[in-house]
Image (spheres, rainbow, N blue to C red):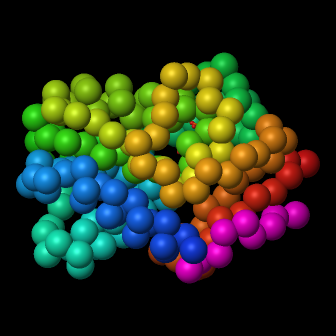
C-alpha cells in the first residue's frame, strides 16, 4: 500500500526552491541548459524552466534523455546498468552548464548513464544534477547538487513521484515492495 509522504503543494515549493538555487548559482543564465531524464524528470525540467521564465523572464532550453533500467527486478538494485535509448538536445551543450533533472536518485546508475550520454554529445563547461527526491542507497560515487527532499528509505521500499502531466496528480509516495 502506498502512503503520501509529500503533498502536491510541498512538492511545488521544493521545485521552486531548486529553481531559486539554480538561479543563484548561475549568474549567466545564458549558458544554462536543462535536461530531464524520462519519464518524470522531463516534466520536472519543464516546470523548472517555466518557473525560471516567471522569476527571471528568461527562456532556458530543455532537452530530454530516455534511459531505461535493465534489471531483473525493477525494485531492487541489480547488476545491470541502465541503457540510453534517446538523447534530444535543442541546442549544443558545448561549454554550457547542463543541469540534469530527475525525480528520484537511488543507486545513481541512471545518473551515471545520463552523464555518459551527455558527454557523448559534447563537452559542457559543467554538469550538475538536480533531483526531487534523494532516497539514499547509492552504489556509485554520485551526489546531487540540488535536492528537493531527502527521504531516507529502506531497500524494501519504493519512492513514487506523481506529476500532474503524467499521473493526474502531484505528490510523493512511499510503498513497500511486496
Ligand atoms: O538511481 P537509480 O537507481 O538509477 O534510480 C533512479 C531512477 O529510477 C527511476 O526511473 P525508472 O527506471 O523507474 O523509470 P521512470 O522514471 O520512467 O518510471 C527514477 O525516475 C530515476 O530515473
Ligand atoms: O524507489 C525508487 C527507486 C528508483 N526509482 C524510483 O523511482 N523509485
Q: Quadrant of the N terminus?
A: bottom right
Give above or below for 27 relative to 155.
Answer: below
Residue 174 percent coordinates (x, y): 76, 58
Q: Residue furthest top?
A: 79
Q: Is residue 130 left or right of residue 88?
A: right
- Which quarter of the figure has residue 113? top left
Residue 98 percent coordinates (x, y): 25, 43
User: What stretch of residues is rendered in magenta?
Assistant: 1-9
Give above or below for 164 relative to 73.
Answer: below
Give above or below for 129 relative to 54.
Answer: above
Q: Is residue 113 left or right of residue 116?
A: right
Give the prevailing secondary structure in the magenta stretch.
strand
Residue 5 forms part of the magenta stretch:
yes
Q: Going 10% across and 52% down the picture, which residue do you hit? A: 28
Give above or below for 153 relative to 171.
Answer: above
Q: Going 68% across and 33% down the picture, which residue do you hit? A: 137
Task: Report the number of numbered marks.
Answer: 0
Q: Going 76% across and 45% down the picture, which residue do you hit? A: 153
Q: Is residue 153 left or right of residue 35?
A: right
Q: Is residue 62 visible?
A: no
Q: Is residue 25 left or right of residue 105?
A: left
Q: Is residue 117 visible?
A: yes
Residue 154 percent coordinates (x, y): 81, 41
Residue 130 forms part of the magenta stretch:
no
Residue 150 percent coordinates (x, y): 62, 51
Q: Going 14% across and 75% down the picture, which residue do you hit? A: 57
Q: Residue furthest front?
A: 24
Amino acid at each position: 500500500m502506498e502512503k503520501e509522504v509529500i503533498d502536491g503543494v510541498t512538492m511545488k515549493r521544493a521545485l521552486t526552491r531548486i529553481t531559486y538555487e539554480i538561479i543563484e548559482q548561475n549568474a549567466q543564465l545564458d549558458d544554462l541548459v536543462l535536461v530531464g531524464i524520462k519519464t518524470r524528470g522531463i516534466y520536472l525540467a519543464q516546470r523548472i524552466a517555466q518557473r525560471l521564465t516567471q522569476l527571471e523572464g528568461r527562456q532556458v532550453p530543455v532537452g530530454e534523455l530516455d534511459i531505461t533500467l535493465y534489471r531483473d527486478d525493477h525494485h531492487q538494485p541489480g547488476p545491470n546498468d541502465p541503457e540510453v535509448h534517446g538523447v534530444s538536445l535543442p541546442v549544443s551543450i558545448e561549454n554550457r552548464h547542463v543541469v540534469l533533472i530527475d525525480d528520484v536518485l537511488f543507486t545513481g546508475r541512471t545518473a551515471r548513464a545520463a552523464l555518459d550520454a551527455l558527454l557523448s554529445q559534447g563537452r559542457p563547461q559543467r554538469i550538475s544534477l538536480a533531483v526531487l527526491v534523494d532516497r539514499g542507497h547509492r552504489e556509485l560515487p554520485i551526489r546531487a547538487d540540488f535536492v528537493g527532499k531527502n527521504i531516507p528509505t529502506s531497500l524494501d521500499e519504493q519512492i513514487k513521484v506523481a506529476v500532474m502531466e503524467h499521473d493526474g496528480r502531484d505528490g510523493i509516495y512511499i510503498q513497500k515492495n511486496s
